Amino acid sequence: MSSTGSTYGDIHRYEPARESTAAAIAIVLLTVVEVVFVGLFTYGLINGWGFSEIGNMYLGSVLAVIFIDLAFVLLLYRKEFLPDVMIVKKRRRKWEDLYIREEQQHGTDSFGDAWEQFKHAVYPYYKR
């Protein structure tokens, strides 16, 4: 899916949100239902419904309905009111996952250059 000339952080695809009226009405109705269930849950907590077994299960069920309703509100909002954006990300090469430098990607010599090793041993800040 990558196109030529795309650099890191460029927006590859941007589709604006649909912003449908039906979704807005559904979100408002689900929010009203959410407020009713939150009120019912709060009323049950204040009146001590959680001290009996049946009341405790009832409060748990109301809390589950609250979170499911909230999930539907967020799902509708994300689908209908947020734009669809794809951003180009930099792909890492396999040797970068091993935390090695680019000059080490093909490996290193077992013995290497003795003179270079001697220079590094004598002066550790020596650069090649």
Image: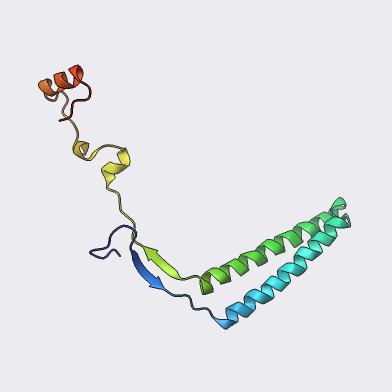
Quarter-of-image position of residue 6: bottom left
Q: From this viewpoint, which residue is outermost toward the bottom?
A: 21
Q: Can you give x and y, in whole percent of width and height, for residue 28 in the image? A: 66, 75
Quarter-of-image position of residue 43: bottom right
Image point 71% across, 68% down: which residue? Answer: 34
Q: From this viewpoint, which residue is outermost toward the top?
A: 122
Q: Nearer the viewer, residue 30 or 65?
A: 30
Q: Can you give x and y, in whole percent of width and height, for residue 47 in the image? A: 89, 57
Quadrant location of the C terminus?
top left
Quarter-of-image position of residue 58: bottom right
Q: Nearer the viewer, residue 7 or 57?
A: 7
With respect to residue 78, does 61 lie above or below? above
**21 horizontally vs 28: left or right:** left
**75 horizontally vs 60: left or right:** left
Image point 56% across, 70% down: which residue? Answer: 77
Q: Can you give x and y, in whole percent of width and height, for residue 55 in the image? A: 85, 57
Q: Can you give x and y, in whole percent of width and height, for residue 22 in the image? A: 59, 82
**22 horizontally vs 88: left or right:** right
Quadrant location of the N terminus?
bottom left
